[in-house]
Amino acid sequence: MPAAGLSRKGFVATPVPMSLEEFRLLRDLVYEYCGIFFKNDVQYLLERRLSVRLRENQLDTFTEYYRYLRYSSNRSQELEEIVELLTTNETYFFREDYQLKAFAEEIIPEIIERNGARKRMRIWSAGCSSGEEAYTIAMIIKEMPKLRGWDIEIFANDISRKVIQTARRGLYGKTSFRTTDHYFLSKYFKPQGDKYVIQEGIRSMVSFGQLNLLDDEMLQLIGMVDVVFCRNVLIYFDKNARLRVVKTFYGKLKEMGYLLLGHSESLMNVSTDFELVHLKNDLVYRKPAQVWKGEQ
Ligand SMILES: C[S@@+](CC[C@H](N)C(=O)[O-])C[C@H]1O[C@@H](n2cnc3c(N)ncnc32)[C@H](O)[C@@H]1O
């Protein structure tokens, strides 16, 4: 049962009033922590969602809550709670199929050619939410006979602990399959009650971990990769946070490695480091090969 005064969605029936000053302080703190930026016109949203946390921590005002977030020994735990309330985790299997087609029919064959000697491929799903994107990549790879015997790893990360737990469980309801072909559903999932669980062979191809894309220390855990999927994540960031994250991707991608963004996202006004490549099925970004500039 929800606590008294809380609706089922976790909103309080009567939110605690938030002043403009309090909104700005909290908005900047959230931004500093995870890059998600709230414009002035969504003050009500922060007010409604964060009121839950005030009640939970038995605080009366947002000024007290701000101090708690800045100085309490529980601050990192509380920031994680905020992330759960403020992130949008919408996702599903086989999202943006034209891009997946480009990945399967154009990008992977190029990598097979390039990495053929070592037979090794690394893929990063950054901002993977509950895992549908990473498992989609794994199923596509599993379907490619030329990749049998390859050493392949898919890293998948999200700032939200909850979605990473869901991803590891691998149990999904109907909405996750809204664009999934029956072929994949019957081949790679087993029914469990009114849900479906991912087959172990696919699950074991993906390593999930909680990671904040703005946390430089944690990012050291990610090695060099051939492809980065970061779809529908940068839209929640402002320009500076985008710039920072895209710089990270540039550093982690091998030469000629691909960066795949969501269909409404682009690097316009963010970075000129990548080249825009016109594939048959999609427009994608690629880290250029280094040009030999002679002895320096
Ligand atoms: C809309 S979902 C996109 C999921 C998937 N990539 C897709 O396109 O279907 C955005 C995800 O980005 C995650 N996210 C937001 N800020 C993040 C950050 N600073 N570090 C890592 N993940 C973050 C959210 O928790 C959320 O699960």
Image (tube, rainbow, N blue to C red):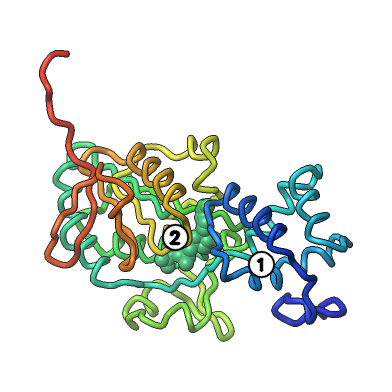
Three-letter amino acid code at disc 2? Val
Viewer-nearest residue: 150 or 96:
96
- Seen from the viewer's position, the closer of residues 273 and 47 is 47
Asked if one can make out residue 200 in the rendered structure from this viewpoint, the answer is no
Occupied quadrant, residue 201: bottom left
Q: Which mark is residue 233?
A: 2
Q: Is mark 2 within 8 Å of ligand 1?
A: yes
Counting from the top left corner in percent of width and height, residue 192 is at 56, 80
> Does dot 1 land on a helix, a strand or a loop?
helix
Q: Residue at x 33, y 49 (%)?
A: 270
Q: Quadrant of the C terminus?
A: top left
Residue 88 x, y percent position in the rendering: 54, 68
Which badge, 2 or 1, comes first in the chain's sequence? 1
Most extreme residue toward the front, as rendered?
20
Q: Nearer the viewer, residue 93 or 138?
A: 93
Marks 2,1: beta carbons within 8 A: no
Examine the rendered structure and indicate whether residue 236 appears above or below residue 189: above
Q: Residues within 10 Å of mark 1 (few under 14, many from 20)?
A: some
Q: Vertical placement of 194 versus 250: above or below?
A: below
**Place of residue 126 in the rendered image (x, y in percent of width and height, measured from the top left):** 43, 53
Q: Residue at x 48, y 61 (%)?
A: 236
Relative to residue 118, is residue 222 drawn left or right? Answer: right
How packed mark 2 is, by other alpha carbons closer than 10 Å (few <14, some 14-19, many 20 or more), is many
Identify which residue is drawn at 49% across, 37% down: 221
